[in-house]
Image (tube, rainbow, N blue to C red):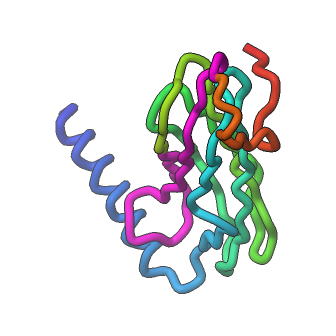
Amino acid sequence: MKKLSILLALMSVVFFAKAQNNNPNAAVFKFVEETHEFGNIAEGPEAQIDFVFTNVGKEPLIIQQCSASCGCTTPDWTKEPIMPGQKGTIKVKYNTKDRVGSFNKSVYIRSNAKSDKERYEIFIKGNVIAANNTDKSIKLNPSVQTANKH
């Protein structure tokens, strides 16, 4: 009986996902940018970016969950439904402490938005320069960093 319940639950999820893709009125994400390049950033402070999107569909857009590809990346998102034509935000923070070198991270978005994939993805990438670096020729992008509150 337990296996049957699990099978029925999985089938309903697949059916819901396919129904959303066939719904001409479904919510639709339209991001200003889907990949953000931080460039060179200093080790220590968090790097942060707000991914702004518009719901260009005809139904309210509801984000059920955002998760990151690792624990160093933290997403926070608009929790209330985003009505058609309205904007929402997914704020992504990257913890640079002890993470010197290049990075490329994904944020996975589970929502009712129309998509060809099971989940929508946005990306951040950049290069963390060691806090003790003395090479003055490396240009840093300090505008995306805030003091680490951890």
Where 32 falls versus 93 (above or below)? below
Q: Residue at x 40, y 64 (%)?
A: 17
Q: Residue furthest bottom?
A: 24
- Pick the residue in front: 79 or 38: 38
Q: Quadrant of residue 118?
A: bottom left
The mark total stands at 0
- Pick the residue in front: 144 or 139: 139
Where 78 falls versus 127 (above or below)? below
Q: Position of residue 128 (x, y in %)?
A: 58, 32
Q: Residue at x 55, y 62 (%)?
A: 112
Magenta segment boundaries in residue numbering: 106-133
Q: From the viewer's perspective, is 75 left or right of 9? A: right
Q: Position of residue 107 (x, y in %)?
A: 52, 46
- Which quadrant would the C terminus be assigned to in this image? top right
Q: Is residue 23 magenta?
A: no
Q: Position of residue 75 (x, y in %)?
A: 63, 39
- Pick the residue in front: 57 or 73: 73
Q: Residue at x 52, y 23 (%)?
A: 99
Q: From the viewer's perspective, is 126 left or right of 149? A: left
Q: Residue furthest top?
A: 150
Q: From the viewer's perspective, is 130 left or right of 54? A: left
Where 69 falls versus 59 (above or below)? above
- Which quadrant would the N terminus be assigned to in this image? top left
Q: From the viewer's perspective, is 65 left or right of 116? A: right
Q: Residue at x 73, y 25 (%)?
A: 45
